[in-house]
Image (cartoon, rainbow, N blue to C red):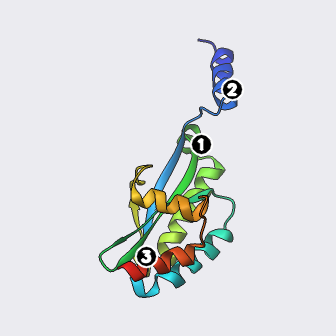
Amino acid sequence: MSQYESDQIKSSINALGLDRHVELGLTVSPLASVATSTAKALAAYLDSHPVVPVRLAGLGTQGGRVVFTLGVTMGSLEDVKTGAPGAREAVLLLQSLVDDFAAHDPAFAILPETHSLEARLAHEVTVGARRVELATAVERLVAAV
């Protein structure tokens, strides 16, 4: 296959939206007693770093903690392989999140399955028909813990 044909195939894949992207999961797990303030701090933090696409991929509880699972988009496979600027920005954001939220046990994690309770709750908070504020959802979770 020629370079031209290879470039044409890549261009077609991109145009169809079939380009595979790498998304890493990061959990932040504050104690229930500080979960609402942590949610607000996390939201403000991510709002101040709009360059890297980040989504709330999961929201749940574990023991006496509220677990926020973030999906951080690293870019396409090619971006990650070549260390493209967007992929490097994502790595820096992850490092910064781990450092700045160290008191809340940040950890790399597998993203929750789409139909899991954690993913559905995160969806309701972010785009669901019954959309609620993250702080309100966290308060409800804390009350249930």
Spatial CA distance of label 3 from label 2 is 45 Å
Mark linked to residue 141: 3
Image coords of residue 125 (percent x, y): 56, 65
**Mark 3 or 2, closer to the camera:** 3
Among numbered discs 2 and 1, the one appearing first in the sequence:
2
For the residue labelled by badge 2, is the local secondary structure a helix, a strand or a loop? helix
Q: Is residue 22 above or below residue 106?
A: above
Q: Are marks 3 and 2 in contact (CB under 8 Å)?
A: no
Image quadrant where residue 1 sits: top right
The residue lying toward the viewer, choosing from 89 and 138, is 138
Residue identifier under label 2: 11
Please name the residue shown 48% across and 62% down the image.
121
Among numbered discs 3 and 1, the one appearing first in the sequence:
1
Three-letter code for the amino acid on which mark 3 is drawn: Leu
For the residue labelled by badge 1, is the local secondary structure a helix, a strand or a loop? helix
Residue identifier under label 1: 79
Image quadrant where residue 45 sits: bottom right
Mark 2 neighbour density, 10 Å: few (under 14) some (14–19) many (20 or more): few
Three-letter code for the amino acid on which mark 1 is drawn: Asp
- The furthest residue to the left: 63
**Mark 2 or 1, closer to the camera:** 2
Mark 1 neighbour density, 10 Å: few (under 14) some (14–19) many (20 or more): some
